[in-house]
Amino acid sequence: MKKGIPVDEAVAFMREAAPAPQPRKVALSKALGRVLTEPVVATRDQPPFDASAMDGYAICKSLTDPVAQGSPLTLIGESAAGKRFDGRVEWGQCVRIYTGAPVPDGAKAVVIQENVRVTDMGVFIEPDGWNDPKTHIRPKGQDFKAGHELLEAGVRLDPWRLSLAAAAGQKSLKVARRPRISILSTGDELVAPGSEPREDQIFESGSFALMAMCRQWGAKASFIGVESDDLDVIHDALKDTEANLIVTIGGASVGDYDLVKPALERLGLVIDFASINIRPGKPTWTGVLEDGRRVLGLPGNPASSMVCAQLFLKPWIEAALGQSARDTALSLPAAVDISANGPRETWLRGRIVTDGEGRPALRPFADQDSSLIAVFAQSDVLIRRLPNAPATRAGDLCAYLPLERY
């Protein structure tokens, strides 16, 4: 059983410990936020024909060709979106055309309607129309061509990607099943929000953050509840919960009332690592039960549990969905001096602010106590400080991890 393992090692372990993505087919209308398990490939060109980019008149000659000025064109038909003109345009003729409509055979350009004058004698093109260098035609396959991979496996579907899949004619998509996560919060000092706490109790808040995080990251989360510091009660609450991952909040240390591990030992718990070289969140641990369910134990302090959820729970969810590891190589200058770090890797809650020259910079909050929820609510980044990092001066680059805020 390992103790005090490096942060990067813990992150890699959580990714490797995640189950393989399980594909399922869902309707396009229900695929928002899901992760693809197979690519989306175009089955035909888009647009599938040369299309007009403007309302105007389709003519058979390029607008840059020499023409007889002042001669009227004969209007021979109309091409609208979904109602193409079936004939062919010859010299001296034109077809009324609308945006998105197929360009008739023989047509080489569209004259925008602002540069056309229609009379009883015919259609006259103004000089600005003849001199316009643009054809105002969107060529067949301009957006994408048949056989092109439009979306790769592992991509999470947002509104714009759903639109692309729809444009490719996909009625349904193969996506990863959402991993199931059960969350248990422990502690005699905790009561549910809205109840009447004793003077020595506080409102339980960690589960609300973790439930929201799990759902935001693509998992299916359920809350088992808040249980007292009682071995039997914790065991009974966890023994039958159906989940790929059990997340416990609190009871992660080695005190007399830290009973999560002893309760889970009755279920065959084998611990992979018992702590991480991190601040906040050193007591974070993980293991597996006899039946294969994995457990991630987070500290009870809200900031500790939320930091460690960002660093270790999110990678597990991403791997279970088939997403690749996220880029953690982001950096910005520090807005203020930051003192030298100790032997534990430290993640500071902070904000992106603007420095004196209008450039973005990282400002950690002065108070980093792991019990402070208000500080986390104001943060939009976690600033990374490696073990034994020297003092950082304002303007020096610092690594950071952005927080997903609405």
Image (spheres, rainbow, N blue to C red):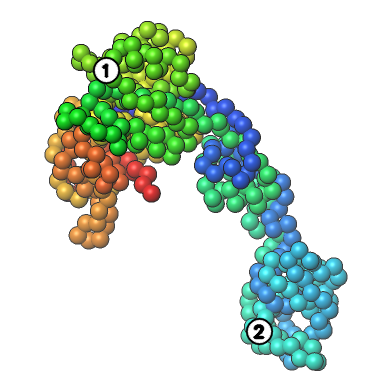
Q: Position of residue 170 (x, y in %)?
A: 67, 45
Image: 317 above or below 270: below
Q: How far is disc 1 from disc 2 in space, using C-alphas?
A: 81 Å
Q: In the rendered view, does 184 fall on the left or right side of 275?
A: right
Q: Earlier in the sequence, mark 1 or mark 2?
A: 2
Residue at left 76%, top 91%?
Answer: 119
Q: Nearer the viewer, mark 1 or mark 2?
A: 1
Name the kind of residue labelled 2 in the image.
Asn
Does residue 249 sit above or below 69 in this rendering?
A: above
**Residue positioned 22% across, 25% down in the render:** 189
Of 90 and 266, the residue lying toward us:
266
Q: Residue visible at 14% across and 46% down?
A: 337
Q: In which quadrant is the N terminus drawn?
A: top left
Foreground residue, 163 or 392?
Answer: 163
Q: Position of residue 101 (x, y in %)?
A: 73, 67
Q: Which mark is residue 76?
A: none
> Badge 1: few (under 14), some or many (20 or more) residues near its Cα, within 10 Å?
some
Identify the residue at the far front of this view: 196
Taking the spot 22% from the left edge, 61% from the top edge, the residue there is: 357
Q: Which mark is residue 115?
A: 2
Does residue 137 appear in the picture of this structure? no
Q: Nearer the viewer, residue 298 or 273?
A: 298
Residue where numbered disc 1 is placed: 229
